[in-house]
Amino acid sequence: MQTRTLGRTGPTVSALGLGAMGMSGDVYGPSDRAESIATVHAALEAGVTLIDTGDFYGMGHNELLLAEALRGRARDGYLLSVKFGQLRGPGPTLGGQDNRPAAVKNFLAHSLTRLGTDHVDIYRPARLDPAVPIEDTVGAIKEMIDAGYVRHIGLSEVDAETIRRAHAVHPIADLQIEYSLVSRAVEAEVLPTLRELGIGLTAYGVLSRGLISGHWNAGPAAPGDFLRGFSPRFASGNVEHNLALVEALRRVAGAKGCTVAQLAIAWVAAQGADIVPLIGARTRARLSEALPATDITLSTDDIAGIEAAVPKGAARGDRYPAAFMADLGVGS
């Protein structure tokens, strides 16, 4: 497994990270606990060192699952990236973001206990809290770094101005944000700002929740598949258009001798050595398909062919429902 360093001050991690959200089945539908744990083990054995979770994924279920999967493993053999602050209610309901300094420390205490570890490698607010200055939130995480409970500070889904303000308080290791062939808004202001400041990018949604994986078919989402069931990109009238883009991408992938998913992941990785794609695989089969993407080298002509098949801005529908988009620092 190749490695990449997250910015000037961040850790060195595997060139692909594992996103664990789908392993707690309240967003993408039911998941299999044994298969999830086996997938984590397979990722570690393949050299994946970066594992991403959130304290609100399954309301603690995801952290407990990872604790079980990581039990007995050397703590220096993997890095935990944890998001915090997203408020939830019973069922698939969201209740805003709480980034108050006291809440930061409270959330961290719960995460350390559930994960069964004495520190988190990268700790980040899941979204911006409009009621709390980002300086206060980052300052609270800095205190936890000084106390030894956190190693690095990350951000998630914020704009360029917020990145600058946060970085002025304490060096930011990375920004986690959606970035894919069909979600390229970060390229306008956010990515140049990260590079100016020496901050890495961990890209989630590189397959747009499976839409551009080459495995999705038009039709209603499965019961319990909350995100895709409400996603504008999967809505009737949009999904057919978006899947036509995937078919164009499939032809490019065929010529390259790889799968659609591998090509889409490789495109994200090719956008810079400061970018680490997060793969939301919750089965060993999907993980096995994704891993070879790190070995794909894309030429200038390859990239031109990919972007001709899926032009910038060609996807129909926002990446989240309108009610969620207001909480994001950048658009689609």
Image (spheres, rainbow, N blue to C red):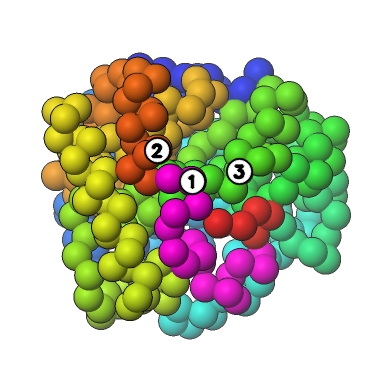
Q: Residue at x 44, y 72 (%)?
A: 232
Q: Residue at x 33, y 78 (%)?
A: 236
Q: Residue 274 at what x, y percent from top left? A: 54, 24
Q: Is residue 249 left or right of residue 316?
A: left
Q: Position of residue 134 (x, y in %)?
A: 81, 50
Residue 1 lies, with reference to residue 60, above or below; the image says above
Q: In the image, which residues are magenta?
A: 311-327
Examine the rendered structure and indicate whether residue 256 appears above or below residue 262: above
Please give the residue where the numbered disc 3 appears in the rendered image.
Answer: 186
Tell me, yes or no, whether the highlighted magenta stretch contains residue 106: no
Along the line of sight, which residue is nearer the eye, 98 or 197?
197
Label 3 crowd (10 A; few <14 / some 14-19 / many >=20): many
**In the shown orientation, is residue 285 left or right of residue 290?**
left
The secondary structure type at the circle numbered 1 is loop
Question: Which label is found at residue 312?
Answer: 1
* 313 in magenta: yes
Q: Are marks 1 and 2 in contact (CB under 8 Å)?
A: yes
| Amino acid marked by disc 3 | Val
**Distance from Cα at disc 1 to Cα at disc 3:** 12 Å
How packed mark 1 is, by other alpha carbons closer than 10 Å (few <14, some 14-19, many 20 or more), is few
**Mark 1 vs 3, N-terminal side:** 3
Residue 293 spot, x, y in % from top left: 27, 29
Query: Quick check: 112 above or below 107?
Result: above
Q: Residue furthest front?
A: 308
Q: Amino acid at mark 1?
A: Lys
Which circle marks residue 307 in the picture? Answer: 2
